[in-house]
Image (cartoon, rainbow, N blue to C red):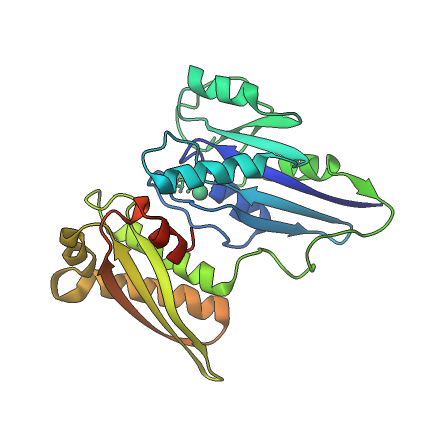
Amino acid sequence: MYSFGYVAVVGKTNAGKSSLVNALVGEKIAIVTKRPQTTRDNILGILNGGNYQVVLVDTPGVHHTKNKLDKKMMKSVRSAISGVDLILYLADGSKELDEEEIQYYEHLPEPKLLIKTKIDKKNINDFKSDFEISSLSGAGLENLKNYIISQMPKSKVKNFAFEEDYYTDKSVKFLVAEEIRQNALNLLNDEIPHGIAVVIDKFDEKENIVIIEGTIVVEQERHKGIVIGKGGNVLKKIGQESRKFAEELLGNKVLLKLFVKVDKDWRNKDKSLKDFGY
Ligand SMILES: Nc1nc2c(ncn2[C@@H]2O[C@H](COP(=O)(O)OP(=O)(O)OP(=O)(O)O)[C@@H](O)[C@H]2O)c(=O)[nH]1
Ligand SMILES: [Mg+2]
């Protein structure tokens, strides 16, 4: 018998959703930062095991909406939840499970599991959960993975949705753009919160080198200088880190050129959101 199904991974921002999807699949599909609202899109992570295929849907963190981008993100979460075979609701074990979260969880359709995350941390709260895991140490992952597979619909014929050598639905271009956004978020401090987007303007794969040009879009004029840094040092660092990732992903030498551009209040502009892939 073959097992195939979809699993939505939802929860508050920073709960560890992207970390879990990456850990289960064993590849870097979704970027991870310590900042809230890192993931903006539904991203598929595909678990292949010969007689099973599980499609994990990583989603943006559930939060109160302030702009059009936030609204789109929450729409992504709602669409991820509908029609899946299982919902994993992730709750950070180092934080209290508040009333709002409990309400949200209770309103989710069945079948669902409450997963306590980050159990490698000190002072883990003792709220009730179905599974306890740490994506960092790997604790509980094998157990959870086997349970997920056991809950997927079965069939005599192989009706997988993806080729078995795929581990995500996203293009390499998307993965590189996201890596640049991650490295920018990690290198910048709280001055620039979530208001950056990354657009790939050129992706030219030659035999011995891939030439990539990308633009980091910021919301305010004064953010531009911060992203570039003194003598261009911040932008250079973002570029170096991202190039390493791109070279590994593409198995080729990469020439990466980054630019910075201002688009005031882009998170509220329909055209900008569309242009930036949201
Ligand atoms: N100690 C510890 N930290 C973790 C673990 N899993 C995730 N983190 C950290 O928690 C932070 C958020 O992780 P993400 O995986 O980006 O969380 P997310 O739920 O995808 O966040 P959003 O995309 O913003 O909704 C990062 O700093 C991670 O390194 C874990 O198992 N243990
Ligand atoms: Mg995420």
Ligand 1 image-quadrant field: top left
**In front here: 1 or 174?**
174
Extreme top residue here?
99
Count of labels in the image = 0
Which residue lies at the image location 46% right of the left edge and 60% below the top edge? 174
Q: Position of residue 117 (x, y in %)?
A: 49, 31
Which residue is nearer to you in this view: 174 or 126? 174
**x then y, percent, for residue 187:** 26, 52
* Camera sees residue 134: no
Q: Is residue 94 left or right of residue 113?
A: left
Give the residue at x 45% y 26%.
Answer: 93
Q: Is residue 130 above or below residue 260?
A: above
Tell me residue 248's x, y (percent): 46, 68
Instruction: Single out the residue that lies furthest toward the right.
Output: 156
Instruction: Give x and y (percent) for residue 210.
Output: 43, 77
Residue 47 visible, this orientation: yes
Quadrant for residue 113, please give it: top right
Q: Identify the residue at horizontal 46%, vertical 21% (top origin).
A: 101
- 47 or 266, which lies in front? 266
At horizontal 65% and vertical 25% (from top left) the residue drawn is 110
- For this view, does 191 lie left or right of residue 197? left
Q: Quadrant of the N terminus?
A: top right
Q: Along the line of sight, which residue is nearer the eye, 146 or 56?
A: 56
Q: Is residue 185 above or below residue 209?
A: above
